[in-house]
Image: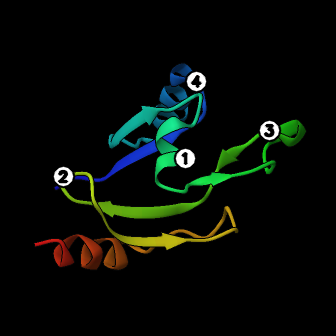
Amino acid sequence: MRPVAISVDAPESSRTLCQKAGDTSTLLADPHAGVMRRYDLVHAGAGIKGQDSARPGECWVDVSGTVRGVNLTDNSWVRARPDQMLAGAQALR
């Protein structure tokens, strides 16, 4: 298992942000929010100029694509702590 982030931002923007932060995790680009819509991670109208943006949250998805756990918030500053992420991953086993 491994964490993967998804962003509506352009791949180059996300890559630059990750490099500046020293983040080496996998970051996927979803500029049309198709994957995020599938997993109910779109925050409608919350982006710049009322555009849809990514809803802050975490999903634990098994190898078949089934969502096994969700931690969603409307606050973009709130994220799961590492221990919460590990607990969610361990529950998939």
**Between discs 3 and 4, the one toward the N terminus:** 4
**Total number of numbered discs in the rendering:** 4
Residue type highlighted by circle 4: Ala
Residue type highlighted by circle 1: Arg
Judging from the image, what secondary structure is the residue with disc 2 in?
loop
- Would you call the spot at circle 2 few (<14 residues within 10 Å), some (14-19), or many (20 or more)? few
Measure the alpha-carbon separation of dots 3 and 1: 14 Å
The x and y percentages for residue 23 are 40, 43
The x and y percentages for residue 80 are 46, 72
Taking the image as shown, residue 73 lies to the left or right of residue 71, namely right
Of circles 1 and 4, which is in front? 1
Which of the 4 image quarters holds residue 13?
A: top right
Of circles 3 and 4, which is in front? 3
* Residue that label 1 marks: 37
- Would you call the spot at circle 1 few (<14 residues within 10 Å), some (14-19), or many (20 or more)? few
* Residue that label 2 marks: 64
**Between discs 1 and 4, the one toward the N terminus:** 4
Judging from the image, what secondary structure is the residue with disc 4 in?
loop
**Between discs 3 and 1, the one toward the N terminus:** 1
Taking the image as shown, residue 19 lies to the left or right of residue 9, namely left
Residue at image position (59%, 60%) is 56
Coloring scheme used: rainbow
Residue type highlighted by circle 3: Gln
